[in-house]
Every structure is written in structure tokens, then in C-alpha cells.
Image (cartoon, coloured by chain):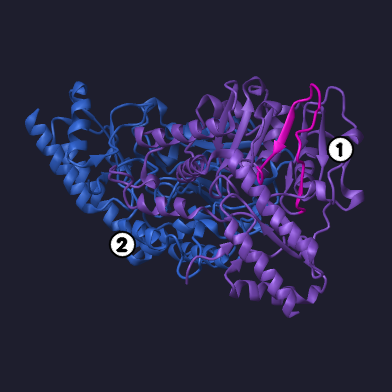
Chain colours: A blue, B purple
Amino acid sequence: VGRVHNFAAGPAALPEAVLARIREDLPEYRGCGMSVMEMSHRGAGFRAIAEAAEARLRALLAIPEDYRVLFLQGGASLQFSAVALNLSEAGQVVDYLDTGYWSGRAIAEARRFCEVNVVASGAPGGYRAVPAREGWRLTPGAAYLHCTPNETIGGVELHQVPEVGATPLVADMSSTLLSRPLEVGRFALIYAGAQKNLGIAGLTVVIVRAGLLGRARAITPRLLDYRVQAEAGSLANTAPTFAWYVAGLLFEWIAEQGGLAALGERNRRKAERLYVAIDASALYHNGVEPGARSWMNVPFTLAEPALEAAFLAAAREAGLVGLEGHRSTGGLRASLYNAVPEAAVEALVAFMGEFERLH
Amino acid sequence: VGRVHNFAAGPAALPEAVLARIREDLPEYRGCGMSVMEMSHRGAGFRAIAEAAEARLRALLAIPEDYRVLFLQGGASLQFSAVALNLSEAGQVVDYLDTGYWSGRAIAEARRFCEVNVVASGAPGGYRAVPAREGWRLTPGAAYLHCTPNETIGGVELHQVPEVGATPLVADMSSTLLSRPLEVGRFALIYAGAQKNLGIAGLTVVIVRAGLLGRARAITPRLLDYRVQAEAGSLANTAPTFAWYVAGLLFEWIAEQGGLAALGERNRRKAERLYVAIDASALYHNGVEPGARSWMNVPFTLAEPALEAAFLAAAREAGLVGLEGHRSTGGLRASLYNAVPEAAVEALVAFMGEFERLH
């Protein structure tokens, strides 16, 4: 069996070159006499890997010097708690933009610790668009405004960084970070689970303005206090060393692809190719408003939902996998992260056309 | 350069057979068309891997049916917070045994959430022994009693499970779990970072009696609530899938070695070989009382501390690495986890003898 085309939403496809590199680095990493997995997190060998990874990420995103980059465990969902505990005081109002499933999860966790004001919600419109900035009801003096620039399940993307005045802007960028250029300086804090465009599950990257450190509430578990991790270089305890190393390989691969501008252009093309095919068909349907359609996650349904199982089975037969929709929504979904090549999208579009002709 | 003998305290050596298996499973896992790192955490492929790993761990430790096994992120240090938040009420007294650095860290974090009673401390004796059970001052009605059966830095091990009556016994077994047989039913909760005997950094295993779930305080971040993770099969969010897979390989390897009884015997022999060599020498010294000496971590000093750098350099030259003591203590340390073969200990003992003759 050869490699399949993997459209999973995360954990997701990795570039073949990165997988080859990981394999070559086993059982010994480049003359070190041991694998990366066996290296002490405080030894010179791993520190070189870790520092190179951070330097590459800083270069890719042109991260300003007054931002700290943290390599943590726990997933973006643990950041739902950490953001609230680090950046707000008890009883303080925090603003959240509700664009779908994942912002909803972030809001639910924040409500356990804060007074949450939802500045706008896509719910009345079935989450098929991002509420227009003009209608957002910001709270003067809010501790921060949280948004989810790409909704992995709903396939809705905020294509512009919103203007929010003096309010610190916080973003869950799990499924969009490194998919295109980004002006980091517009944000107070960005976090992302690695298992989409940054590598493998088990690593969460946090990019935070240094001035926001040191405000964690007394009830914050020590390892969730950003200051503790920033002061320790993300080594307040044993870091997820292997996932950190894989992230470094991804960053290197992205640079080799021409950086975020080149990848962004490629990702735009990939998404456009698929949306055009969907819109031209009578069988496939994507209900997201064109201006809010995600470049990373393309959910779609079939005019005849009963054909879904046949579609997935035939797709698998054709070497196209990971096309199931999220368990909360059903339907189908193609995720088009960086590591999904244009050839995979071509293969998917061709398959979809053929499947439509047959049914 | 060939493989070195790695005596690091964690992340630590992995069995060569496990590394070979990981390599063989790249870039495609056993005919799946993708690597484990690329599999959806909710797909059938990864679920089979995850369930097999749990089943193997249950078999190795004969874990009773009324215990849940959780595969989490964050490291044992995040469990310092989670244990307190899940198993005690605000203001309730919790008992802690102080045997050294790591129990001290657990105590410091618990103090942020609980009234901590230290039942006994090895501090007056320089942490060279485990305080005798007869002298422990238990609190009637304490929420739990926490101990650290093996102190990775001090090299002190509690070789018997203490009798603590009705108090739930909680243990940080990061550096001793799976190194020998264990009666899990004596404990209310066991936790362990994986990067010593269970695989690689980024995974933490929690074994908890089901009756203790559902008591987390309101301030507990959702993902630290054991009930949430137990009900979700450790998939309340994306799990550290690759580390979970490696843990499964380790469990399989342990079974192939003859299980915990065989490994325990081997580990006892390895430790004894090294302690005998240290005690017989005039240059090397281990100050831990014989009855409390760890099978896993053997710290030692040189009669001439100025020779340390020369010792480490010569050892590295001889292919023996990871022998630096912890940064908090200095000195030297050899960790003898499962994946360190008897041949490595023989090589270390031979090297130490030769070094002593030369200096």
C-alpha cells in the first residue's frame, strides 16, 4: 500500500520530506549516538534543536522581539483555561467573538472564570459567515477580546485581522497559523495546537506579548502560568521534546517552500480549486458565504445524504482518506493544510467529479 | 558513531527494538498509507493502537477493573496541581510525605490549594533515607496521602507500599512505574510521566480508582478534571497520539522481556552491581542508606570533586553519557531504567574502575 492523500482535520498529513527526515534521524540523530526521543531536555543536544525551532518560527512570522514563544503541552483546549486565568481578573469582563464550535468551547471555559460578553455571534445565521466587524459590541476596558480566526469544523475563516482598539486581541489559530502571512504585532496572544500546520499532537505553541506576563491569578496551576514557562524557556518541566523537534522540521520545510507568502498563495489556490468544483456541481454543497470560506477546512454535504457512506468508501478506495465531517455535524470535510499538496486536491476534485457522474 | 549507553534521568534511553519498530512504522504504519503521527485521534486506526496500549498496561500491572487509566499531557508536574484540585476540597487537610526534591515540588504546589500536613520529612537527615513509617503523623480524615516512591534526584526509594489505613494513597511514580511488580489496588491514584520507563516526553499516565472521579473543584481547568478525561477515554481533546503509540510499544516490549517480575529482578541486579562497585571504591560515594537506595537512579560523588569534569569527558569518550547529576545538586548520577541493559551497567562499572585506577 502506498501513501494515501490525507484530508484529516488534525492530527493531519505531514510533508513526506519531514517524515523521511524523522526516519533518517532514527535510531540515531545525526551522529549523536541516540535518538531525539532519548535526549535530556536540558542537554546541549536538545537545546540546540529547541532553539533552532524557535528561531525558525520567529523568522517565518517575523515575530517582534517583545513577544515570547512558548512550546507547551495540553492542546489549544487547555489554553481556553490558561488565557482566562492569565489575562483576566476574577469578575472582569472578557469579550469573545462567537463564530462556531471552537469559539463556543472557548467561551464555555471562559465563563467558568470570567464575565463573558459575546461581542457578536454567527449563531443566528447558522455560522455561515463571520459577523461583520461593524456590529460587534465591544466592552470598554475588557481584559481582552478572543476570536477563533479559523473554525476547523464550520469552515469559516476571518480573513482580516479585526481592528479592536486598545483591547488586547487573543486568537486561537490552531488551524490557520503558518498557513499564510500574519501580522503578529496586531495580537496580544496567539495560540495553536501543533497537529495541523505545526507538526504533531502533543505540542501547543503560544506567542505572547511579554508585557502580559506575570498577571496570572492565584488559582492558576503553576504550569499554566505563562510567566513561569516564559522564564524557564518552556522548560518549567519536561517539554514534549519529540513534538518540538518535529515542529522545527516543519518550520524548516515551510522556509524551503518559500515561506508563508508562497504557502499562502498555494493554499489559496488549493481552496479555490475545491470551492469552484463544489459550486459547479449539483451533488456537493458548501453553505459558507464566499467571503468567509476557510482556506484550511472545507466542509461539504451531498444533495443525497444517503450517498455519504458510498462516497467515503469509494474515496478510500481511491486513496483519499480523512474526509469524514466532524462527529458533531456529520457531512464531509476536506482539510487542506500546508502538507496537503496541490496534487491531492486535484485528485480529490477528479474523484468528486467521477463520483457525481456515477450517481 | 554507534549507539551510546545513555544513563540520563529522563527523557532517557529507549530499547533498541522499540526504536527499530518506530523506524519500520515510518513513513507508513503497517499498511495504513500514513504514519501514526498523521492519524486522526478519533479514527479506527489510532483507536486500535490506543486501546491495545491500555490493555497491555492493564495486563502488565494487573490493574483492577474499577480503576481508570488516563493518557494525558502536561507531565507529572501538572499532576501536582490536578491531584490537589481533584481530590481535595478548599481548606481540607492533605498529607504529604517529604522524601526530597520532587515531593517538595508536589508539596509546594499543593500548598497553593490545600492545607498541607507533612507527615514526615527526610530533610533533617539530608534526605538519605525514607522516614520510617512508625514516625509518620497522619491526619485523621485527610483527603489523601501523597508520596513519591522514587526520588529521581536524591536516589531514595520507598521499597514497600506504606500502610496508611483508610486514607487514599496517591503516588508520583514517574521514575519507578513499570520497573518492578506493583500492587495497584493499594493506591487510590498513581501518576507518572512517560519519559523514564513508559516511553517519551509529552505523555503522563494516571491510574485512578473510579470512585474518586467527579469531585474536582469548580476552579479546576476543564481538561485537568479527571472525570472529564475518564468519560472521554482520554480524548476530551486531541491526545498526544504519537507518545501514546510509543508507550504501547514499550508495554509490548516489557511483556516480551518476561513482564515486571523479570524486569524487576534485572533492575535489582543492575542497581546492586553499581552500588557494590561504588561501595568498594575509594573514589566514588553514594550517601543513601542501603535500605532506601533507588533501583532506578544512582547519584554519586567523587572523593575529589575537581575530577568530575574529567570523569564526564572520559565517560563520554567511552560511549557512556547522561551521567551528570541534576542541576540542583551537582555530582554524578546514573539512571538505570528498563531500557538500560545490564551490559551498559557492566560497561559503566568497568569504566569507573579504570578511571579510579588512573586517578
What span is colored magenta in the figure? B154-176
Q: Where is residue B224 in the image (x, y as percent from the top left)?
A: 61, 34
Q: What secondary structure is marked by label 1?
A: strand
Would residue A142 be visible to someone looking at this image? Answer: no
In percent of the image, x 66 and y 39: which residue is there?
B79
Task: Say whether residue B159 is magenta.
Answer: yes
Q: Nearer the viewer, residue B296 or B219?
A: B296
Q: What residue type is labelled 2?
A: Ala
Q: Is residue B141 magenta?
A: no
Question: In the image, is A8 to the left or to the right of B97?
Answer: left
Q: Name the residue under label 1.
A: B118
Tell which of B295 and A53 is nearer to you: B295
Camera-side residue: B226 or B167? B167
Q: Nearer the viewer, residue A115 or A155?
A: A155
Which is the main secondary structure of the residues drawn in magenta?
loop
1 vs 2, front mark: 1
Q: Residues within 10 Å of mark 1 (few under 14, many from 20)?
A: some
Q: How far is the residue under mark 1 from the one under mark 2?
A: 59 Å
- Residue occupying the point 71% across, 70% down: B353
Residue B215, compared with residue B6, is above or below; it is above
**Quadrant position of residue A145:** top right
User: Chain for mark 2?
Assistant: A
Quadrant of the image containing the C terminus of chain B? bottom right
Q: What residue type is labelled 1?
A: Val
Q: Which residue is the site of mark 2?
A: A262
Q: How many labels does the image show?
A: 2
The residue lying at 81 percent from left, 36 percent from top is B96
